[in-house]
Image (cartoon, rainbow, N blue to C red):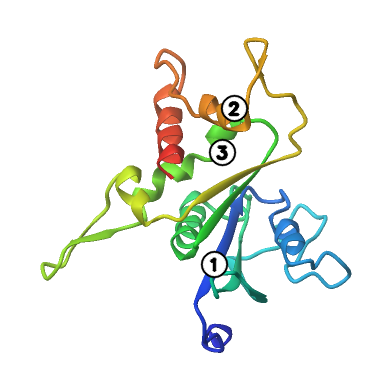
Amino acid sequence: AALLREIHEPVAVLAIAGLYRTGKSFLLNCIIGATGSKPVFTVGSTSESCTRGIDLCVTPTMLENGARLVLLDTEGLASMEQDEAYDAQVFALALLLSSYFVLNSMGVLDEAAIDRLYLISELSKHVCVHTQAGEGMDIAGSEADLAQFFPPLLWILRDFVVDLVADGKPISQDEYMEKALESRPLNSRRADERNRVRAAIRAL
């Protein structure tokens, strides 16, 4: 709170989220050029999470629109130290506080990756929208209803070392993402649940 009170200009908040131990803090350090012996965000090589809750850094960087860059580093998702409800709360708070949201993941987009992002489909349980002024009614809508309140999303695929090809033809990054997020037939196990996750990501 004390850091924020010292800011007298508009702020642009960049938040990052993703699975634990996948290099989120290191990526933010790279953005602000703090990869030497004194990183701004703590990094480590153990199996324990380095970040607890949400860490904040007010950078000296001023953007072209006159806003000061503020970085939010969130605690990694799906660690053995926290439960799903905690993960969803941290994710939702970072999403709502940010001007630009970065989703960090490793490798290709497969069914396992979709499974790990299940909590995106749970956002409507943790975010309420005030819809009727004066009547005190707060309701949670679908992810599509909430999307108007969310910032732009950048999905980073780390350690992605395969060529982008579909049906033997090269495809673009956007085409790869769109294909990965297409709804799947409902005759496979857990297809409905995974399609909900895909729809929630598309809404973002």
Q: Is residue 28 left or right of residue 68?
A: right
Q: Quadrant of the C terminus?
A: top left
Amino acid on which the number 1 mark rests in the picture: Val
Look at mark 1 in the image and give the residue it sits on. Answer: 13
Q: How far, Cα to Cα, is label 1 from label 2?
A: 28 Å
Graded by Cα atoms within 10 Å as few (under 14), some (14 to 19) or many (20 or more), the crowding at tag 2 reads: some
Tag 3, which secondary structure?
Answer: helix
Q: Would you say the residues marked 3 and 1 are in contact, meaning their CB atoms lie under 8 Å apart?
A: no
Q: Earlier in the sequence, mark 3 or mark 1?
A: 1
Q: Quadrant of residue 114?
A: top right
Which of the labelled discs sits on residue 151, or is there none?
none
Q: Earlier in the sequence, mark 2 or mark 3?
A: 3
Task: Where is residue 11? Give x, y as percent.
Answer: 52, 74
Look at mark 3 in the image and give the residue it sits on. Answer: 116
Tag 2, which secondary structure?
Answer: helix
Q: Is residue 106 left or right of residue 56?
A: right
Look at mark 2 in the image and give the residue it sits on. Answer: 176
Name the mark nearer the viewer: 2 or 3.
2
Task: Where is residue 12? Give x, y as percent.
Answer: 53, 69
